[in-house]
Amino acid sequence: MSDQKPGFDTLAIHAGAKPDPATGARATPIYQTTSFVFDDAQHAADLFALRAFGNIYTRIMNPTQAVLEEKVAALEGGTAALATASGHSAQLIICHSLMRPGDEIVCARQLYGGSINAFNHSFKSFGWNVVWADIDDISSFEKAITPKTKAIFIESIANPGGRVTDMDAIAAIAKNAHVPLIVDNTLASPYLCRPIEHGANIVVESLTKFLGGHGNSMGGIIVDGGNFDWGKNKGQFPMLTEPNVSYNGVTMYETFGNIAFAITCRVLGLRDLGPAISPFNAFLILTGMETLSLRMQRHCDNALKVAEWLSSDPRVSWVSYAALPGDKDHDKQKKYAPKGAGAVFTFGLKGGYDAGVGTVSKVELLSHLANVGDTRSLIIHPASTTHSQLTPEQLEMAGAGADVVRLSVGIEDVADIIADLDQAMS
Amino acid sequence: MNHDVYEPAYIRQILEDVRTIAIVGASSNEARPSFFVTKYLVDKGYTVFPLNPGMAGKEICGRKVYASLGEVPEPIDMVDIFRNSEVAASFVDQALTLEPSPKVIWMQLTVRHDEAAAKAEAAGVRVVMNRCPKIEYGKLSGEWGWVGGNSGVISSKKQSLHGSGKMQSLGIVKQ
Ligand SMILES: Cc1ncc(COP(=O)(O)O)c(C=O)c1O
C-alpha cells in the first residue's frame, strides 16, 4: 500500500488477510486440520525449538487462527495476539503466564460475573489470590497493591452495568508499581475503545461477543501491547525472563522482545493447557469482524434510542447507560468511547422481581438468554437466572437487584425493539 | 534519518539488496537469539559469516566462524551487530574501514548508537537500529503472522513461497 496509514475499517477487512500463499484464495480458507507436514527433519527440529516460524499442530497454531490473531492485534494496536477457545480461557492463559502460587492480582469489582467467579474460586485453587478494588474509588487500586501483585485487571466498559472505567488513572497506578495493566475490552470492542492507547499492556477479549458478533462461535483473544518491560525487576516474571527447560533454555523476553508475552502465552500456556480455538470458529469470527464498525455503530445508536425511551417510561425507575447525558459515567464515556457506549446496559423496573420475570417471559422479538453482543436483541433478568443463587444483599452488591433487567440491544429496526419491550413490560 | 520508525519499504529494499551478511557476536549456543537469527538468515539463502573471536575457525550452522570483520574473505553487504550499544560504535568504525564498504549496518533489538549511525550514514551506508532482521523478514514475507504477530503489512497480492521450494517457507527475495 501507499505510505498512508490504513484506517480502522480497512484494517478490519484486510489486516492479516492476504490472499492464501498456497492457492491464492481471496477469502481466508478454513484450515480444518489438526497437524502440518514438516519440510524435513531439520525443519521439524527448528519448529519445536522455536527457531523457525511455521505450523506444527492446531493446539498451538493454525493458519486460519493466525489471520484472526493478526487482525485483532492490528485493530487493538498491539504487537501480536493469541486466539483461544473462549474469553475465559484467554484470561486463564494470561494469569498462567504471569502468576505463581501465592501471587496476587488486583481486580475491579465491576467485572463480568463469570470473571468474578473464576477469580474468586477457580483461580484460588492454583494459589492465585485476587484482591478486589473499586472503579468508583481509584485509590483502592493503589492500596491493594503489594509486593506479590503481578497484574491489575479491569474492564473498559464493564458487564453488566455498562460502567466505564477510568483507564488513564489506573494505568498510572500500574506503571508506578511496574505491574502490567490487563483490560478486558469485550463490551467496547476496539471500534469503540483501544485500551493500549490508554496505557494497557495486555488486552483480553471474548470474541464470542461483538467481534464475532453473530452469536454463533466461542472464541477469546490475548493482545500483547508490546509496551511492558518484563525484565525490569529480576525474578518478577520468571516465565518470561528465565531460561525455559522445555525449550532447551530459550529465554522468551530476550528472544521475542516486544511480542514475548504473546509468544509465552502460546508456546507455554496454550501448548500445555490446551484451549485452542477451532479453525471453523476462527473463520466465522473473521467474517463477523469485517463488519465490526457497521454493526457496532448501529448497536450503539439503537441502544441509545432504547435507553432514551426507557428513561421516559413511567414503568421504569432508573436506566444506567453511559451515553445518556445525565449518567454518572457520561464524561468518562465521552473520553474513552466517544463513538458510543456499546449495546449492553441495565435498567430497573418499578414492579421489582415479578415485573422482571414477567418482562423476560413475554418478549417475542428479544431473546431471553445469557449472552451479549449478538445481532439479535437479548434480554435477561439476572436475579431470577444467572444470579439466582445469591442473597438479596449479594444481589445488590453485584448490581443485580431484584428489579434489574439487562439488555444487549441488537441491530434490528429500533422501532421494533422498543415495541416488543413496550408490550412485554405491560 | 529518523531511527524510531522505519517504513516497510526501507527495510524491504535492504533485505532484497544484500546477499552477504556478517554477524558480529554470533553464538553456537542453540538457545541464544543470535543463533536463531544466524540459522534463519542461512535458511533464507543469505551468505552468512558468523563472527566470534572465541570460536574462530570452528563452524556455526555449517558456516566458518571468523574472529573479526577484516578476516572475512568476501565483500560484506551487511554487518549485523549482536553486541551492546556501548561497544556497537567500535564495530561500526571497523565496518567503515572495509573495502568495499558495506551497504548496510544493522544493530539488533535493544542495540542503538545514534552517533555511530550518523557517521555511517555520512559515509553513504544505510543504517537500521533496534530491530531484528529475522523479525523484519518474517513481517515482510508473512511468516510473522503465523505466530500471531502484527506485521503492519496489508496487501491484496498473494504471498510468495520461498525460492527453496520448502512448503512452510515464505520469501521476499527473488532467488
Ligand atoms: C466482559 C466479558 N469477559 C469475558 C467473558 C467470557 O467470555 P467467554 O464466554 O467467551 O468465555 C464474557 C462473557 O460474557 C464477558 O462478557
Image (spheres, grey):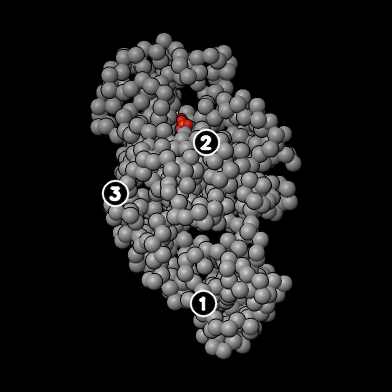
Element class at badge 1:
strand
Residue B138 appears in the rendering: yes
Expressed as whole percent of the image width and height from the top left, the position of residue A61 reads 46, 45
Q: Residue at x 72, y 51 (%)?
A: A233
Q: Is residue A161 above or below residue A194?
A: above
- The residue carrying mark 1 is B20
> How far apart, in angstroms, are the residues tagged by discs 1 and 2?
42 Å
- The residue carrying mark 3 is A27
**Residue A326 falls in which quadrant of the image?**
top left
Q: Which mark is residue A274?
A: 2
Which subunit holds the residue at mark 3?
A
| Foreground disc of the pair 3, 2 | 2
Earlier-in-chain disc, 3 versus 2: 3
Task: Using a 10 Å C-alpha cutoff, classify the residue at mark 1 as few (fewer than 14 neighbours), some (14 to 19) or many (20 or more).
Answer: some
Element class at badge 3:
loop
Dot 3 and dot 2 within a common chain? yes
Task: Using a 10 Å C-alpha cutoff, classify the residue at mark 2 as few (fewer than 14 neighbours), some (14 to 19) or many (20 or more).
Answer: some
Q: Amino acid at mark 2?
A: Gly
Q: Nearer the viewer, residue A422 or B171?
A: B171
**Image-based side of A283 in relation to A125, left or right:** left
Q: Is residue A317 above or below residue A336?
A: above
Image marks 1 and 2: residues in contact by CB distance under 8 Å: no
Q: Residue at x 45, y 42 (%)?
A: A58
**Residue A146 falls in which quadrant of the image?**
top right
Residue A186 appears in the rendering: no
Which subunit holds the residue at mark 1?
B
Expressed as whole percent of the image width and height from the top left, the position of residue A199 reads 56, 50
> How far apart, in angstroms, are the residues tagged by discs 3 and 2?
28 Å
Q: Is residue B131 above or below residue A175?
A: below
